[in-house]
Image (cartoon, helix red, strand yellow):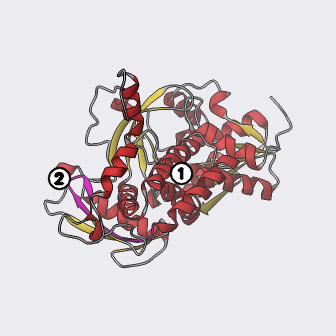
Amino acid sequence: MSTSINKVVLAYSGGLDTSAIVPWLKETYQCEVIAFVADVGQGDAELEGIEDKARNSGASACYVVDLKEKMMQQVVVPAMQAGAIYEGDYLLGTALARPVIAQAQVELALELGADAVSHGCTGKGNDQVRFEGTYAALAPQLSVIAPWREWPYKSREDLLNYLAERQIPCAASKEKMYSRDANLWHISHEGGELEDPWQSPSDKVWTLTNSPKEAPDEPLEVSLRFVQGCLNAVNGRQGTLSSMLSELNELAGTHGVGRIDIVENRLVGMKSRGCYETPGGTLWYRALQGLEQLTMDRPSVQLRKYLGNQLAQVLYDGNWFTPVRHALTAAAGELAAVLTGDVVVELYKGQCTVVQRRSPQSLYSEAFATFEDDDVYNQKDAAGFIRLHSLPSRIRALQQTKGGQL
């Protein structure tokens, strides 16, 4: 092993993997290990006592950095302006948090004079690419240590035995459990019975949302105000983006909104099955769709959909700090200039339905759209339009008919 590593900043969660990584780094590289904890809204229970956990594992220090509002402003808002969604269903909860986490980790490493950064991502997943893509873009001079690609351990039991031998406390057990990742935007669930795509998820999988069957019998209407695609108020009340999203999570989660069960294509080539809960994000996404319908012409809608698909791929693949991402979010921001207005969404038994929308940028004209008598639209104009619109089909048909005339 290299002896040039003196100080490592580890992206630390307090879970089994990173609890084992701290002593492993010290033993393997004879280096100082500093724990970096990102608060992205995973919950107070996950952060309680985490500094002591890190030090008990052998870290020389532990830094907890609040990144909730930064994640919302710098990543979530641009993603929602574009309508980013991966493979038609996934609102990118894990991927949305990674750019700000890895960026803050790099900034701490540079500030402390570290010569390496480390993470607990497995060699099978997407997150290793997301973390290391950010490291490469922002501080390529830092060495990267990925223990799951180096150490001999293969299972949870191996890590638990490793910690037990060193008398390092850990709350995890040998019982097979779900792998979960939580932040303010969502929570993901993988592993356990979910590894069999023929097995329905049990009730114990879900943690943020009520079952639609057990949701309230009365629907709830929620009003959202947007300014240029950015959430501005919930039910007429303004607040920080993180506080408003927390309120949306509570409202939508109570009504069973935001659950998906998908098999997705990972960046590394394999398929994986995951259950995701994104209650507030689903409400935000659907409301913006309602506003888009009111304020954007057809080419703009089509372009926004394209940008959203492309940005989702960029996020999923860990390419946030790239020229392509900058170009995509700039374009999406330009389109989102008209996404200002109010939307009312009805929540009921897992459904999230836009029922009202209004905007000063609205392109909807009742005078033109009405089925009643009007004096602004000459229906005879449609004949010439249809003739020109269908001209290629008419020419093709005439070519196939001898002696055909236009």
Quarter holding residue 216: bottom left
- In the displayed orientation, state which residue is furthest to the right: 4
Q: How many labels does the image show?
A: 2
Dot 2: element: helix
Few, some or many C-alpha atoms within 10 Å of disc 1 (few <14, some 14-19, many ≥20)? many
Q: Magenta part of the protein: which range?
A: 339-355
Q: Identify the main secondary structure in magenta.
A: strand
Does residue 14 appear left or right of residue 131 in this picture? Answer: left
The spot of residue 211 in percent (x, y) is 23, 49
For the residue pair 329 and 100, the one nearer the viewer reads as: 329
Q: Mark 1 is on which residue type? A: Leu
| Picture coordinates of residue 293, whole percent (x, y) | 37, 59
Horizontally, residue 163 falls left or right of residue 202, namely: right
Magenta stretch: includes residue 383 = no
Measured in 3D between alpha carbons, the distance from the residue under mark 2 to the one under mark 1, in whole angstroms, is 30 Å
- Any mark on residue 96, and which? 1
Q: Name the residue under label 2.
A: 214
